[in-house]
Image: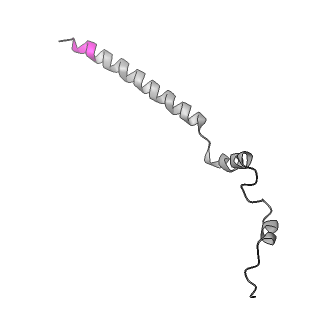
Amino acid sequence: MADPAKNRKIFIVVFIVFTLVVALFALDMANRTTAPWNKPRQLDRALPGALPLQDSLLLDSLLPDTTRQK
């Protein structure tokens, strides 16, 4: 059977390499992910007109008046 000290060294090296690989994957995913507070701006750039106009009075004037009785 192999020396226990050698097995321990192999385990530590494999553990450190695995931890580094997982940390690098996490950093890569974090860099490619859009922050939640940036999403509306990107949606407006990707699909112009998909978001309602910033002027709410103009938006209200375009909607039909639902309070009037016919």
Q: Quadrant of the N terminus?
A: top left
Q: Residue at x 50, y 30 (%)?
A: 25
Magenta segment boundaries in residue numbering = 2-7
- Res 53 quadrant in image: bottom right
Residue 12, position as x, y percentages in the image: 34, 20
Horizontally, residue 22 falls left or right of residue 10, namely right
Q: Position of residue 61 (x, y in %)?
A: 81, 71
Is residue 44 within the magenta segment?
no
Indicate the position of residue 44 as horizontal and vertical percent values: 73, 49
Q: As rendered, which of 61 and 7 lies closer to the eye? A: 61
Q: Which quarter of the rendering shows the C terminus?
A: bottom right
Q: Is residue 45 above or below residue 23?
A: below
Total labels drawn: 0
Left or right, 61 with reference to 3: right
Residue 62 point in image, percent of width and height: 80, 70
Above or below — where is 35 with respect to 12?
below
Q: Is residue 61 left or right of residue 51?
A: right
The quarter of the displayed image where residue 2 is located = top left
Is residue 31 positioned above or below 70 on the image?
above
Residue farthest toward the bottom in the current orientation of the protein: 70
Query: Relative to residue 35, is residue 66 depicted above or below?
Result: below
Q: Which residue ends up furthest to the left in the rendered image?
A: 1
The colour mode here is: one colour
**Residue nearest the viewer, comparing 5 with 36:** 36
Q: Residue lying farthest front?
A: 70
Foreground residue, 33 or 49? 49
Task: Give me the residue at 42% from left, 21% from top.
Answer: 17
Main secondary structure found in the magenta portion: helix
